[in-house]
Image: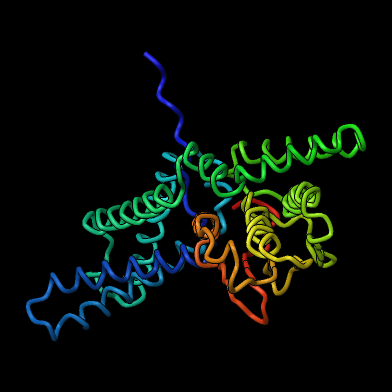
Amino acid sequence: MPKPAAPDYPAHLPDFCNLGVTLRIFLGAEGLALATAWLRVAHVREVWAAFVAQSVVLQPALLLILALLCLGRRWLAALPYQWGVVAVGVLCLAVSAGVKTMMTHLFGDVTLQFSWHDAVNVLALAGLLLGYFHLRDQALSPALTEARLQALQARIRPHFLFNSLNAVLSLVRAEPRRAERALENLAELFRVLMADNRQLAPVSSEVALCKQYLELESLRLGERLQVAWHIDNMPSDALIPPLVLQPLVENAVYHGIEPASQPGEIRINIYRSDGQLHLVISNPYQREGRHHGGNKMALGNIKSRLMLHFDVEASLKTQVRDASYQVHITLPYRTSAP
């Protein structure tokens, strides 16, 4: 029998230092506390009092657990997923028991003592939240074969490949070195697109890939394609999801340069500000042209991967301003994977 295929996106614990993850855990825990209070009391007017009584114990323990999980995220990430789940459960039990024991001595209230009932509730809550993050990751991460298909459909259009090969053929005799360079760029572009692109990559490598792609496009567009790079303030060690910049640059060529009869300029600005990395791509905007409307597959795929890696800490915004179409991506500045 053939061996089962390895999962396209292996299970892993969430990044407990991520703001979105922290908010989801906190709101999820408080929501379950509110639901428990609603079920335990006989009258609606008693719900708030019961909820507050639970939150007085829940919130200190939850804040301490989140702080410890953030501090130990690298150690947890090094564990197999199953052992990581066990470690999170043990930490939640220990912290919850410690907080309730401290409150019992502090307030002299024996009803606050940690019991087996509390242990079951803590483990159930931790299991529900970890299960939610696991299902969310699987929903946001497309299968590897689907991701490759999207790469071919949305990023390497058939006309681009056909035109690139024709341009190379026209250079073989007249400029053999330039033709060789073009073939190397084309091979590198396909190598990256067909690779396993689930890990964060340095922004410098993404910039190099875009330059190779633009060099290929310049073979057929000539002086019509002008590019302005503003990367003097770019932190080369910043990590971003792979194939974020190149599809946006390709869209800029396809929708901004090709439909116009006059030369157009694509502006690429990458910089760091206040602990965040900004990627801004602008191109001429044709309100009426052969390519108006466009395919939103690339933008949708990029948004999904930004959510997968950075949750609410990353954003993608588009706007039309002064006959220019702009895409602005903001994400946390990181030099190591979470």
Evaluate whether residue 270 shows in this view.
Answer: no
Residue 171 percent coordinates (x, y): 86, 38
Q: Residue at x 36, y 75 (%)?
A: 106
Residue 184 percent coordinates (x, y): 80, 35
Q: Is residue 86 left or right of residue 156?
A: left
Q: Is residue 184 left or right of residue 127?
A: right
Q: Is residue 143 left or right of residue 253?
A: left
Q: Quadrant of the N terminus?
A: top left
Which image quarter: residue 315?
Answer: bottom right
Which image quarter: residue 226?
Answer: bottom right
Q: Residue at x 32, y 71 (%)?
A: 30
Q: Is residue 31 above or below residue 235?
A: below
64 or 327: which is nearer to us?
A: 327
Residue 5 percent coordinates (x, y): 44, 27
Q: Residue at x 54, y 39 (%)?
A: 148
Q: Residue at x 22, y 70 (%)?
A: 111
Residue 52 percent coordinates (x, y): 27, 80
Q: Is residue 222 left or right of residue 13?
A: right
229 or 27: which is nearer to us?
A: 229
Evaluate whether residue 38 shows in this view.
Answer: yes
210 or 62: which is nearer to us?
A: 210
Q: Is residue 283 above or below residue 215?
A: below
